[in-house]
Amino acid sequence: MAIFLRLALWASLAFWSASELVIDVQPNVISPEITRQLVINCSITNNQVQHLEVIKSLTLSRYNETIREFEDLFVLNTLTLILKQQTNVTVSQISYGNTHITLTLHNPSQFDAKVYRCHATGDTAEGTNISMFAKKAVEYETNLTALIEEIRRYKKNENFQCTLKKDENSEVNQRSRLHFYGSSEIITELIEPLTITCLYKTINQGEKVMPALQTLYILHETKGVIAYINKGQPVVTAMEEVKSKNVKGELYQNKLKDSYLQLTWTNLKLYDSGKYFCEAHVQYLEGRSEKFTEMLTITVQSPTLNDLVNVIQKLITQVDEDKESIELSKQNIENIREDVNTHHQDIKTIRKEKEINKENITSKKEVLDTITQNIMSLRVDTNNTITMLKKDIDINAGNIKILRVETEENITKLKEELDTNKQLEINFQDSLRMKVANILTDLSELKIRMDEGPAISCRQINSTHNRVIVKLLSGLQVMCDTKTDGGGWIIIQRRINGKVDFYRGWQEYRDGFGDYNIGEFYLGNENIFNLTSTREYDLRIDLELNNTKYFAQYENFKILSGTEKYKLQTGDYSGNAEDSLSLHNNLFFSTFDRDNDLHSGINCAERSSGAWWYSNCYDSNLNGQWGGTSYKRMAWRDLTGSINSVSFSEMKISEREKNYFH
């Protein structure tokens, strides 16, 4: 009985080998009478293969008797997750994931009864490239009279249930339980949805006797495999009418959680009636494998008049609810319109206030200009007065010497006049200091009011986010770093994952390229020149290598105009990344189509797959190939040496503060 059951359910699986490279076929015997589909699954469980440290590719092949060798069907690059089809396969469905390829052949023929091979390639821990193989044969059988009779007899037996041999599996049956149930056993056609769940429960009896669940299947007696899940892989559905989002499952190695496979579909038809089967394949530590099976009978019946009436009543109720919802939405829209009108009025008021503020600022500027002129006049008058006082003192001192013989009364009067003049000078200076302090206070308040307008640079941006995208007063859209070293940084170059190609020509580096949403971009040499030519900036370069962060900072950073080939100019260095940029100071910018480097024999930009202020050729090459090695890499020589590449690069500039009141 167990042998016939295995054939009827298409669930023959090979024992799992010690290595984790597996090829599985369902079923392993096909025939034109009952086989609706053939499923070939090439997979790597637990995302690893014995002896392979790095897995590079996974290939599904089929033996070709004509050429007497295996012919590749599909090749999966596991590093990039790119699947390539090598041979045309008709009437098929292909799915793949991180470490598996699953091919489903609909209505397989005798041509599909071949040997299938799963081929994994990669590197060992020592760096040696090796390959591993697993094979599985599919047989073709046409004389199925006995099998068909067995299936017919099996369909008539409504009380059939799958049991294990008592002498071999009584202990396993006590430890492991397979539950298979549906949302209902009788479903109304095209009206009721159906949800069926295959649940595998394990009672912990110790590590030595605990089986490991490898696969869960849900099958239909005539349609074959509906859905399945292998250890370490996502759920796969083989029915087009069952969408992938309605299938879920998980194989837990944790003894505290139950593994399950569940699918839901709607619009069932009468031909969806029949017997459904749940199969669980387990493996023991000693290498022995077992299979558990449960059956569920589902009946899809035609809807009655009462069913249709109930559906119509539900639809009417739903329509009434939708009408109420629409009315509520209309009311909400009307409220929003009123809010928008109110906001429009507020905006008009704000605009008027803004115009008034502009007029006030203009008036204060005029007052400030007048005060400045008065200060200049006072300064001239003060200097003249001081000069005259000095002359008077000199004259008086001379007169004292000449008239020393005169009376003490005249000498006393002269001293009193001198003391009076000094006190007048002190009082005048105190008054002048107070006026200057008041003017500085007015200037500070004016500066604060002017700063409330559009941002000139990232120094005026405050945010709870580490990085924000803003449009400056100049109209240039930039990404600001608001946290690093106090914030205020304009990011001019950023590389995090290699999704943006930085091997570009002169015009693109002039205008800028990349995507702020991706997080990789270059602001553009012309934009950087416009920024650094009007104000003084510092440059900071943040780097990451082997999960360790470094930075290098340079004072007085700027690049010159396009007519000067965007020459680089930097000042003093500080940081913990060592100085790998000073070699490029006062050098021109080069791209593969504009060679401005100092090397007479080669184009450094072309050789290095980048664009930089190359010398002969570089100490740093942060616009090189992301993740590259040798010359074509993101280099910072004092960190990466001559081979490695940094995994993160962010170049940013910050305006140096000026003191306008000294």
Image: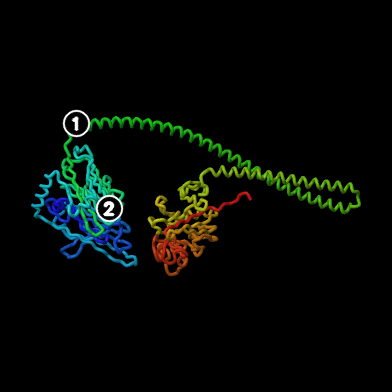
- Mark 1, secondary structure of its residue: helix
- Tell which residue pokes out farthest to the bottom in this image: 601
- Residue 205 is marked as 2
Left or right placement of residue 284 versus residue 359 in this view: left
- Left or right for 33, reference 247: left
Of 183 and 71, nearer the camera is: 183
**Which residue is more in the foreground, 555 or 589?**
555
Check disc 1: other Cα within 10 Å, few if <14, some if 14-19, many if 20+: few
Residue annotated with mark 1: 306
Q: Position of residue 73 (x, y in %)?
A: 22, 59
User: On screen, 634 above or below 274?
Assistant: below
Q: Which mark is residue 58?
A: none
Query: What x and y, as percent, mark residue 229?
Result: 25, 51
Q: What x and y, as percent, mark residue 48? A: 30, 59
Relative height, residue 521 to residue 351 (above, below): below
367 sits left or right of 99 in the view: right
Residue type marked 1: Asn
Q: CA distance from mark 2 to mark 1?
A: 52 Å
- Label 2 Cα neighbours within 10 Å, binned few <14 / some 14-19 / many ≥20: few
